[in-house]
Amino acid sequence: MSPNPERQAMSKLTTTPQLRRFVIGMSGGSGVIYGIRFLEVLKEKREKEKIETHLIITPAAGITIKAETDYTVQGVEKLATKTYRFGDIAAPISSGSFRFDAMVVIPCSMHTLGAIASGIADNLLVRAAEVTLKEKRQLILVPRETPLTLIHIQNMERVALAGAVVVPAMPAFYPRPETVEEIVDHLVGKVLDLLGIENDLFRRWQGMT
């Protein structure tokens, strides 16, 4: 049966740009500025790109925000569309029935990495990560630790085998960064690339000149 032209026209008229939802976790590893910058960029794109951000900040991340930046936890929370309490295990994002596109844990502490790798979902961040994996959605983890123990490496292997993408917070120097902000933007830009979000945060490699 040939398609109904009137129905096709009506479908086009009622189609709206698809909303993209991202869950963002910030845990207590050093490098909270990566998570803050990531939230800032998504907030700038929120209206044009039809993006929602759902944020969980762990208690340890709250301490690290105070130690490493001039931001407050409340100020960081305002960058997101919606925030959740770390212990709110009944929040919408704890269920696979709540639709979201991907989750990013930035930064991801070794404690959080180990919990995700072991399936110990005793808080909302780890539960949301577990949901992301079991629903076959994209999970991006940005670990920040050095040196790495064998346990850390094995946990990265376990989450990678489960379907996560591990993006260690390692600076690149081919763009010849002159500021800390440029180093941060390079990593954030790489994460945005994995999510399919257009950005010009860093100079892309064009070969040797």
Image (tube, helix red, strand yellow):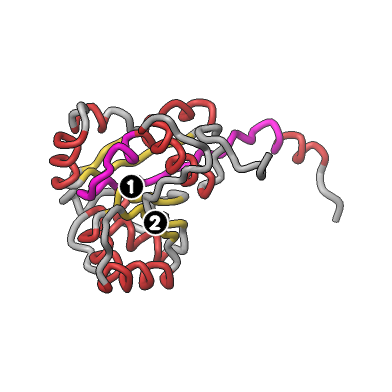
Viewer-proximal residue, 5 or 95? 95
Q: Position of residue 184 (x, y in %)?
A: 39, 37
Q: Position of residue 15 (x, y in %)?
A: 64, 36
Q: Tell me: 27 left or right of 159.
A: left
Q: Position of residue 103 (x, y in %)?
A: 39, 51
Q: Is residue 56 above or below residue 114?
A: above
The amino acid pointed to by label 1 is Ile
Residue drawn at (85%, 56%) of the image:
1
Query: Residues in magenta?
Result: 11-36
**Mark 1 sits on what residue?**
106
> Is disc 1 in contact with disc 2, using a CB cutoff of under 8 Å?
no
Quarter assignment of residue 81: top left
Q: In this view, which residue lies farthest toward the front? A: 209
Structural crowding at the residue carrying mark 1, measured as other residues with C-alpha within 10 Å and reported as few (<14), some (14–19) or many (≥20): many
Residue drawn at (17%, 41%) of the image:
64
Quarter assignment of residue 24: top left
**Mark 2 sits on what residue?**
97
